[in-house]
Amino acid sequence: MKVSQAAQATAGLGLTQIVGWGTTFLMPSVLGRHIQHDLGLPSEVVYGGITVMFGVGAIFSPRVGRLLDRTGARAVMAVGSVLYALSLAALTLSQGMITYLLCWAAMGVASTLALNTPSSIALAQIAGTRARQAIAVLAIIGGFASTVFWPVSEALELLFGWRGVVLIYAAIHLTICAPVHLLMLPGRPMVGTHAPAGAPAQVPPSAHTERIFLLLSISFACGAFIFTGFIVHAIGVLRGLGHDPATALLLATLIGPAQVAVRVFELAFGHRYTITSSTLFSSAVLPFGLGLALLAGGNFAVALVCIMAYGIANGMKAVLRATLPLALFGRAQFGTYLGRLALPQGIVSAAAPPVLAAVMASYGAEGVLAVTFVVATVALIATILLVRVSGTVR
């Protein structure tokens, strides 16, 4: 496909990713207190919708990945947008815990069809050799979801209430995201990205490939646990280390700029170094920052290093979650492998916030840092072993 067409698809997917993250994962941050008051639900249930979404999405990810390899992304992602619209519309009618969580479960299926993993698979099928750059651009664009939707949600809630806001978001998925997926994505995978007619649906993986997959899965799952869990408790951890509320908030707000900055750096200079180098760096910087904070996190400079390390590692992982499997396994079965990798990542993403909340309640900020440091170290060890097994990849 021509570069201009790949750029068009990247821009379109960037828009739908901002909408997808902003209207689901980020939505309770602004509307949660209004939902809690209106439905009479405890905050754990209101925010538990996100956990349900991740958990349900993880279950369906392997099957959807294989489907994307066979059919391409256009129809799958368009259906996902329609399901998002129906789920959000149903959410406006919910009256209690069961209907509320069922709507989030439906959003979990929709996210598997139209959010992060399918968009990366789509770009791998469309952009070809430029997939690394296209995925980096998509990660940069997606990083602005909170910047766009937090103030928009706040303003719209004052005018329409939380149910009106969610209904507007349902309409956006139906009238904007679904047409973008239908018009900007090819109907089937590009030539060379899927097996010829009559070929087996999958090539049986070798023991070497499965070893690579296992190590990659461990590394990514550990990273997902930290990136999903720590961000929810970042301000609380910083306050627990002795920083005043204003300082803790200031430090936490630097996570976003660090993520975007490293993604821009990857886009501009990523072609000059191997994906292996990026992977090792992002895996090493995280335990380094967490370890320093565990030793002396009450010091402002040390806390700043920890936050920047977290932001850099998270920003890089958002790109590497797609580009590293693409480099290791190729495009032919990229969707299958990415779907399989999404299963453990989704499960730990669903579990991380409540697990770290329990650790925070029992052992404080130091306990959260200790747990995340150990998990980050396991990820680093798995990454080092992965590089030794797979060798250098570009």
Image (tube, rainbow, N blue to C red):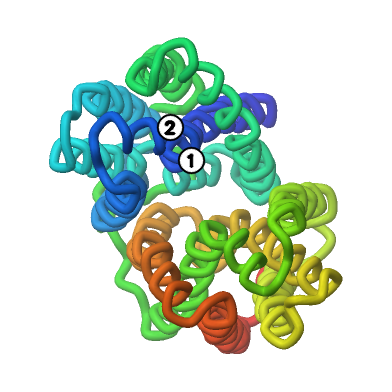
Counting from the top left corner in percent of width and height, residue 82 is at 30, 23
165, above or below 345, in the image = above
Q: Quadrant of the C terminus?
A: bottom right
What kind of element bears circle 1? helix
Binning the other alpha carbons within 10 Å of mark 2 as few (below 14), some (14 to 19) or many (20 upward) gives many
Q: Can residue 219 be seen? A: yes
Counting from the top left corner in percent of width and height, residue 158 is at 49, 16
Q: Which residue position is annotated with label 2?
A: 31
Counting from the top left corner in percent of width and height, residue 364 is at 52, 77
User: Nearest the camera: 229 or 265?
Assistant: 229
42, above or below 114, in the image = below
Q: Can residue 386 be seen? A: no
> How many numbered marks have been drawn onto this rendered protein structure?
2
User: Nearest the camera: 185 or 251?
Assistant: 251
7, above or below 120, in the image = above
What kind of element bears circle 2? helix
Q: Quadrant of residue 288?
A: bottom right
Identity, as a three-letter code, of the amino acid under mark 2: Leu
Is the residue under label 1 in contact with that under label 2 (CB below 8 Å)?
A: yes
Q: Residue at x 68, y 42 (%)?
A: 140
Instruction: Give the CA separation, mark 2 to mark 1.
Output: 6 Å
| In the image: residue 309, left or right of residue 355 | right
Counting from the top left corner in percent of width and height, residue 73 is at 40, 36
Identity, as a three-letter code, of the amino acid under mark 1: Ser
User: Nearest the camera: 351 or 142?
Assistant: 351
| In the image: residue 104, left or right of residue 335 | left
Q: Which residue position is annotated with label 1?
A: 29
| In the image: residue 321, left or right of residue 332 | right
